[in-house]
Image (cartoon, helix red, strand yellow):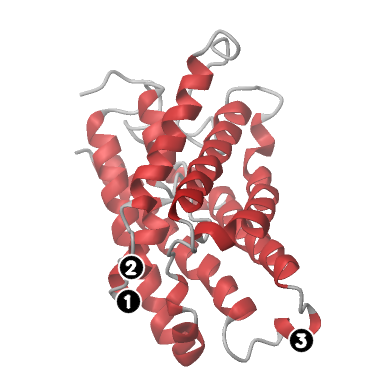
């Protein structure tokens, strides 16, 4: 790999670590034992909305940051797969990004344990497990990822919408976490679920957090390949900083 490609992988790894640490810190602070947020916002639905907004805001800030400028800030294997299937990344980019995301997720989750201690443990470091109905959990993860990938593909393919792509994520996750989290934890991101699972050793129905997001991604890709939306074209595998590309990963090259 070229030096700039390694730089992109490193940025993606660090960005995913920050997403896990920052986003799951919001989960722990809002819902952990002794949380002060529970006193002034006792309704768990509104606390989930707040938590989703903060999680999404973490992703938004990373996307806008120099890290997002370098890597494109996928921060999610499902997003990387979507860009790959839209012919915007080579095979080595797909594999490299997913590995970087998984490593970053483990690092971010591990740092959580050191920073939050007992409060983090009370939320099992933000690990995702299905609720009482695994079918509903699977459907919830499929729908959440479908909406996430559709939003990203729609905004990044439209010249007027492109600049607003990062700002959709906090709003989207506020709604998704508020409504869907009781079903599955509202991951919509295999790396986000993998990190806490590895750190805590809690692998309950972990397969769901890979199969369901990739199913949601596949459905989104089918929609964008349909006659309704096939006129939309994505020209770069990034969520922001569209004119900047130091790597060989992110701009419609032949798969190698």
Q: Does residue 234 appear anywhere in the picture? A: no
Residue at image point 48% right, 55% down: 187
Distance from label 3 to label 2 (Cα)? 29 Å
Q: Please state, as top left, top right, bottom left or bottom right, where the C terminus lies in the image.
A: top left
Which of marks 3 and 1 precedes in the sequence? 3
Q: Nearer the viewer, residue 55 or 60?
A: 55
Q: Earlier in the sequence, mark 3 or mark 2?
A: 3
Q: Is residue 210 shown above or below 245?
A: below
Please tell me whether mark 3 sits on a helix, a strand or a loop. helix
Q: Which label number is shown at residue 39?
A: 3
Q: Residue at x 35, y 76 (%)?
A: 110
Count residues near mark 2 (Cα–Cα under 10 Å), then give few for <14, some for 14-19, many for 20+.
many
Q: Are marks 1 and 3 in contact (CB under 8 Å)?
A: no
Between marks 1 and 3, how big is the CA–CA gap?
Answer: 28 Å
The percent position of residue 107, horizontal first and vertical second, equals: 34, 69
Q: Which residue is mark 1?
A: 200
Tag 1–tag 2 contact (CB < 8 Å): yes
CA gap between label 1 and label 2 equals: 5 Å
Relative to 225, say whether 75 is above or below.
Answer: below
Q: Residue at x 47, y 70 (%)?
A: 21
Residue 172 in sight from this viewpoint: yes
On screen, residue 191 versus residue 43, left or right, reads left
**Relative depth, front residue between 255 and 113:** 113
Q: Secondary structure at mark 2?
A: helix
Left or right side of 12 for 143: right
> Is residue 132 positioned above or below 3 on the image?
below
Q: Position of residue 74 (x, y in %)?
A: 45, 44
């Amino acid at each position: 790999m070229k030096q700039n490609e390694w730089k992109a992988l490193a940025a993606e790894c660090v960005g995913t670590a920050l997403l896990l640490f920052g986003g799951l810190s919001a989960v722990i602070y809002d819902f952990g034992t002794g949380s002060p947020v529970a006193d002034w916002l006792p309704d768990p639905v509104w606390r989930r909305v707040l938590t989703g907004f903060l999680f999404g805001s973490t992703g938004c800030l990373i996307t806008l940051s120099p890290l997002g400028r370098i890597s494109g800030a996928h921060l999610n294997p499902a997003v990387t797969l979507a860009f790959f299937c839209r012919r915007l990344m080579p095979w080595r980019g797909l594999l490299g990004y997913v590995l970087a995301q998984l490593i970053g997720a483990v690092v971010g989750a591990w740092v959580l344990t050191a920073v939050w201690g007992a409060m983090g443990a009370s939320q099992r470091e933000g690990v995702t497990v299905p609720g009482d109905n695994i079918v509903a959990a699977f459907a919830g993860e499929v729908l959440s990822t479908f909406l996430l990938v559709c939003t990203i593909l729609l905004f990044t393919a439209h010249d007027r919408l492109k600049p607003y792509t990062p700002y959709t994520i906090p709003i989207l996750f506020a709604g998704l976490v508020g409504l869907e989290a009781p079903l599955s934890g509202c991951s919509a991101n295999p790396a986000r679920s993998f990190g806490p699972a590895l750190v805590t050793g809690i692998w309950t129905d972990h397969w769901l957090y890979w199969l369901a997001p990739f199913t949601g991604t596949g459905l989104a890709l089918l929609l964008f390949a349909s006659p309704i939306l096939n006129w939309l074209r994505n020209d770069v595998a990034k969520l922001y900083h569209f004119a900047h590309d130091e790597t060989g990963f992110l701009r419609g090259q032949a798969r190698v």
